[in-house]
């Protein structure tokens, strides 16, 4: 939290000078007149203090931890509508990231406990350094799809190594709309892990057994279980040929109304 006292010829001048030195605007500070001296040439002393907000608490806490660890790094906080986004930069950023982000996650958790004191809206807190989060999301998403393909092909579930909540969410999100596999978290923290399981198909598909032969599915078994008739198939009788008699002139000899058609020709 930043605070400064400025003495100037007027309150407005002292306030403007304090805001310039703090790099803040008037909405971010609280100002009070400390004293006023002089009869002819008045001097006004103003104390300007930065307001305590969630972003300020996070910035002070993280930068304080960094200074105590003697690490060459700086944290910059950006407050958004739904989250506080902290960006770490400096020579020793990798130290604050740690192995697979374990130090970064611990620092994020501790900072969230601090910010909750002045966080009535319940905003999230995300700490990132050197774009580590985006790189980790890309790596885990690729891994999830690779294992999902293997699970769908073998029809056998696979368990991933224990992960923190952030990494588990990446796996779940990457395979949320997958048609062939589903994901579930098992175990207890900090050894909770994700299991990728093949989905049961709506109908039995033809599969291959371990020896490469065809394995009968439920649909095939149903067909083969139907009783077959032992009687030999009866030949289909030929349709009787229509009896047509033609005379030498090609006129059909027919009976109609008891008369002979020949008499009309």
Image (spheres, rainbow, N blue to C red):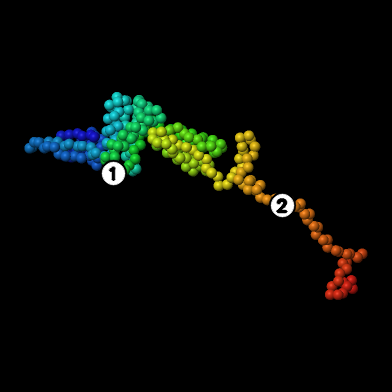
11 or 257: nearer the viewer:
257
Residue 145 image position (x, y, % from top left): 50, 36
Q: Is residue 142 visible?
A: no
- The residue at 35%/36% (across/down) is 126
Q: Which mark is residue 229?
A: 2
Neighbor class of circle 1 (other Cα within 10 Å; few <14, some 14-19, many 20+) is few
13 or 253: nearer the viewer:
253
- Viewer-side label of 2, 1: 2
Residue 100 image position (x, y, % from top left): 41, 30
- Kindly indicate the quadrant of the structure image that contains residue 44: top left
Q: Is residue 71 left or right of residue 175?
A: left
Q: Is residue 209 visible?
A: yes
- Farthest-out residue, bottom: 258
Q: Which mark is residue 120?
A: 1
- Kindly indicate the quadrant of the structure image that contains residue 32: top left
- The residue at 83%/63% (across/down) is 242
- At mark 2, the secondary structure is loop
């Amino acid at each position: 939290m930043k605070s400064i006292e400025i003495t100037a010829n007027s309150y407005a001048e002292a306030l403007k000078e304090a805001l310039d030195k703090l790099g803040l605007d008037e909405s971010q500070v609280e100002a009070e007149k400390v004293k006023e001296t002089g009869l002819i040439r008045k001097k006004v002393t103003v104390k300007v203090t930065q307001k305590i907000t969630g972003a300020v608490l996070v910035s002070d806490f993280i930068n304080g931890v960094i200074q105590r660890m003697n690490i060459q790094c700086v944290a910059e906080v950006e407050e958004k509508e739904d989250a506080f986004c902290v960006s770490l930069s400096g020579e020793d950023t990798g130290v604050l990231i740690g192995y697979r982000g374990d130090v970064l996650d611990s620092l994020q958790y501790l900072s969230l406990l601090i910010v909750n004191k002045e966080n009535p809206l319940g905003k999230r807190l995300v700490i990132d350094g050197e774009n580590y989060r985006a790189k980790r999301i890309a790596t885990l998403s690729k891994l999830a799809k690779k294992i999902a393909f293997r699970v769908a092909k073998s029809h056998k579930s696979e368990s991933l190594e224990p992960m923190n909540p952030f990494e588990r969410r990446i796996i779940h999100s990457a395979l949320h709309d997958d048609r062939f596999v589903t994901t579930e978290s098992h175990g207890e923290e900090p050894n909770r892990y994700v299991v990728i399981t093949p989905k049961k198909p709506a109908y039995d598909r033809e599969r291959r057994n371990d020896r490469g032969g065809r394995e009968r599915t439920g649909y095939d078994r149903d067909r083969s279980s139907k009783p077959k008739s032992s009687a030999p198939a009866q030949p289909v009788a030929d349709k009787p040929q229509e009896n047509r008699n033609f005379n030498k002139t090609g006129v059909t000899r027919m009976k109609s109304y008891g008369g002979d058609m020949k008499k009309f020709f």
